[in-house]
Amino acid sequence: MRTTADQLRDVLDHWQSGTGPLYSQLADAIVSLAEAGSLDHGTRLPSERALAEALHLSRNTVTAAYQRLRDDEWLEVRPGAAPTLGARARGLDGMSYQDRFAKILPGTRAPLVGLSSACPPPAPVVTEALRDPGELLDGSLSGGTGYAALGDPELVRAVVEHLRSRGIDAHPDEVVITAGGQQALWLAVTALAGPSCPVAMEAVAYPGVFDALTSAGSRPLALPMTREGLDVTASVKLIRAARPDVAYLTSFQNPTGTVLEEEDALRLLAAASAAGTTVIDDRITGELALTGSPRPPFASLETDAAVVTIGGLSKVFWGGLRIGWLHANATLATQLRNRKAAMDLGSPAFFQQLATRFLTEHYEATLAWRLDAMRESLAATVDAIVEHGLDWEFRTPDGGPCLWVRIPGGNAERFAARASDAGVPVAPGTAFEVVPGQGSEHFRLPFYLSPEEMRLGVKVLAERAA
């Protein structure tokens, strides 16, 4: 079991030089671990003497660090007792994973413009296939039992070829077919994360991750973010200090749309390898590059880190297709394949057969079509925001289907409630935050719908929800 002193030693060892006096660095290290959730409210810190000895610092340095933390209300001190982290280190808020997920799901009432869920309408090839599946399958639709519990072999081969085309040296026994990316994520996290152990994740993250954390009995470790994306330097320090079981990372971040460049990915992978951390590379939106090219999967990079890659067809073809996959070492893949089969007897064989054709014959063309459509809708959305004179703040996303919008001085929960009442539901930023306050002024605005629908949605939000 790693002690608080162990974690602080790792943070200080990897702290950049020139960041201020040593006592200030020590205080900042304690705050960073508390803000990330690695040290919880009420955690007992070592005595001044014990921490000074453990870190090979003077006692005066520790005394000054603790005094600064007391002045800033990070520490609570009682006579004769060790200091503990105070109310500011409140960690993850009380929102349940059911509440989080409910905020991104469509309601029972049909909306005027549905913007709570970042799921696309079907691509033309999907519409045609559902109208006449026999034509797409050349009359080879196989009924049989309707089960393909361990994954249709042809679909597995198609996924292997797709992964290889992206630089991953994949083999059939390393692939698990899942009912979408959410199930793949749940399977991976619950298999890899131990009870009460930290899972590193971006400070705002896809709400579906919290369900997996709850099922695993794990806790989140918030990796700091800036407006431009993940703070990689600070995240490397936290991973080395906390040594989480799992680090959940994305190329195009959901909900912010920021990108993780290859050089930064390599730094994170090196830190994960040194800490014995398995990296889950969520590629569900990884192909949706709005500027430049998709960044390579982590498993394709020269690294010693253990990587599980998650992918799927929902963000390119249609959310209702519910076909995803994960790639891992053969031992873990076998375990998860059998576990998945026991859960639901596999995704329907019919949809797996359709997915095989989509992936082998229509993927690149449909991806290009989807990206063109998203760029048109994004442009229409931005034009509508400007037209209505809204003071919303956002950066143009590098990839993915969403704007992460800040309402200066606004309350995301109240805004989302008004938006829902107006018939244009959106997901408040609080559904995505790991540390309270990260999303309180934000909401997620997907732009998968047509330009006309996006203009109407922004118009209604401007008139009735602002």
Image: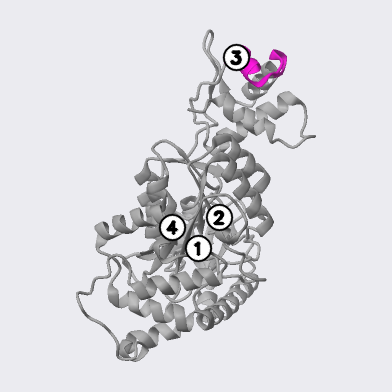
For the residue pair 181 and 421, the one nearer the viewer reads as 181
| x then y, percent, for residue 402 | 55, 65
What amino acid is at disc 2?
His
Mark 1 Cα within 10 Å, few/some/many (few <14, many 20+)? many
Q: Mark 1 highlights which residue?
A: 465
Query: Which label's residue is closer to the chain start, 2 or 1?
Result: 2
Q: Which is more foreground, mark 3 or mark 1? A: 3
Task: Please state which amino acid type lies under the numbered disc 3.
Answer: Ala
How far apart marks 4 and 2 lie (CA) works out to 13 Å
Task: Give residue 121's position: percent from left, percent from top.
Answer: 43, 77
Along the polypeptide, which appears first: circle 4 or circle 2? 4
Q: Quadrant of the C terminus?
A: bottom right
Mark 2–mark 3 Cα distance, whole angstroms, equals 42 Å
Q: Are marks 2 and 1 in contact (CB under 8 Å)?
A: no
| Residue denoted by label 4 | 417
Up the image or down, 331 lies above or below 105; here it is above
Outermost residue on the top side: it is 80
Please report the residue visible at 41 percent of the width from the left and 73 percent of the height from the top: 157
Q: Nearer the viewer, mark 2 or mark 3?
A: 3
Alpha carbon separation for disc pair 3 and 1 = 55 Å
Amino acid beneath label 1: Ala
Q: The residue tagged with tag 2: helix, strand or loop?
A: strand
Q: CA distance from mark 2 to mark 1?
A: 14 Å
Residue beneath the point at 65% across and 23% down: 71
Q: Which residue is mark 3?
A: 50
Q: Quadrant of residue 72?
A: top right
Q: CA distance from mark 4 to mark 1?
A: 8 Å
Task: State left or right for residue 303 relative to residue 100.
Answer: right
Q: Which residue is mark 2?
A: 442
First reached walking from the N terminus: tag 3 or tag 1: 3
